[in-house]
Image (spheres, coloured by chain):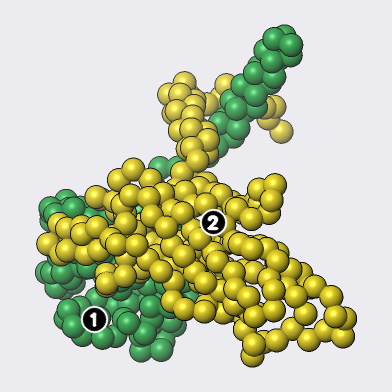
Chain colours: A green, B yellow
Amino acid sequence: MSGRQGGLKTALYILFVAVLALQPVTAAESFKPFKKLKALDGSQQSLGDVLGPKATLVVFFFPTCPYCNAAFPEVQKIYDRYRGQGLSMVWINVLPDEEKLIAPWRAQHGYTAPVLLGNRSVANDYKLRMTPTHFLLDAKGAVLSTHAGYSAGDEKSLERDIQQALGQ
Amino acid sequence: MRSLSSAIYSKPLVSRISFLAAAGLVALFSLHPGAQAPTPPSPDAKGRTLSLSTAHLTVSATVAPLQLSRGGRLVLTADVVPNAGMHLFAPGARYRVVAIKLAPNSPFKLEEPVTYPKAALYTFKPLNEQMPVYNTPFRLEARIVLDASRALVTPVRRPLPVTLKASLDYQACDERYCYLPESVPLRWTVTAAP
């Protein structure tokens, strides 16, 4: 019995090593382009339409997400501060049943960052487990950094990453 | 075409070590129950209690009785145990409140609103906001009847099997994250008198 188990372990180990060896080595991970998503003005936008000249912050959210509500006042300030310096930003809603909340929610909080209407399938495409989840991209759409959740002070590290992406 | 062994050994040693480390982590995560999507529950021997775990909680849901008399009601109870450090929103919170929901177009309906136990008050520090939550085991109870407007039409006057489809919908949070809302499917077959 133990001999069979040993053989199985060896076979699994060989398979494990083989699988590892076949994995590609990636320098900078590319952000998977999303299919065209509807914007609040009814237009359809793809990732290429929202990429900024230097950097882009993509944030997945939904309006009743508690940590989004904690983070977004700071994220909006960052948008206001750097949008004229080459930063683009887009917030992608992942819960269609909250789409109707978005317009009044933006108005209530004075948010101006562009919003696209996604769904759970989009969330699954990026393997999201929580919101907000941020992806900071370079001008070509490569992922520079990611961040999930929010704690007070997180906006400082996000801002540092953005400044670096903008070459400041 | 390169052989498998040459493909392995042509990698630099550092890369192979990186691969091993990365795949080891993947293997660990894949073995962790919290990393799994909710799996379809399986009924117990009596066909009444469904038990399953997600990354955020464990739920044991029971429907009784399984034989529904004419004009009778079913009681669905869901005993929910949040994982350590997790909380779910209770009625009164302005977020997504944990709920038992019947499937759309169900032949059943709620006889009265789902009953909730008393919740704990939780302070959400980032917004300095107090909200009612469940962070310890709790029970939800739903009284369910056949929906007369969706009456079962049958020429045979004998008990009929009817599927009760429901879900436990919730959003779970901890001290650092709020996870994406989940809908845990629940399903029973009950026998309804004609």
* Residue B2 coordinates in the image, percent (x, y): 68, 30
Camera-side residue: A30 or A132? A132
Residue B135 relative to residue A112: left or right: right
Q: Residues within 10 Å of mark 1 (few under 14, many from 20)?
A: some
Give the residue drawn at x 56%, y 49%: B51
Quarter of image, res B185 = bottom right
* Residue B134 coordinates in the image, percent (x, y): 32, 57
Q: What residue type is labelled 2?
A: Ala
* Residue B155 coordinates in the image, percent (x, y): 87, 85
Camera-side residue: B105 or A97? B105
Which chain's residue wears label 1? A
The image's mark for residue B61 is 2
Disc 2 from disc 1: Cα separation: 39 Å
SS state under label 1: helix
Q: Residue under label 1, please give it.
A: A106
Residue A139 relative to residue B141: left or right: left
Residue B121 relative to residue B157: left or right: left
Give the residue drawn at x 30%, y 73%: A63
Farthest residue, direction top: A3
Quarter of the figure with the N terminus of chain B: top right
The image's mark for residue B55 is none
Farthest residue, direction right: B156
Quarter of the figure with the C terminus of chain B: bottom right
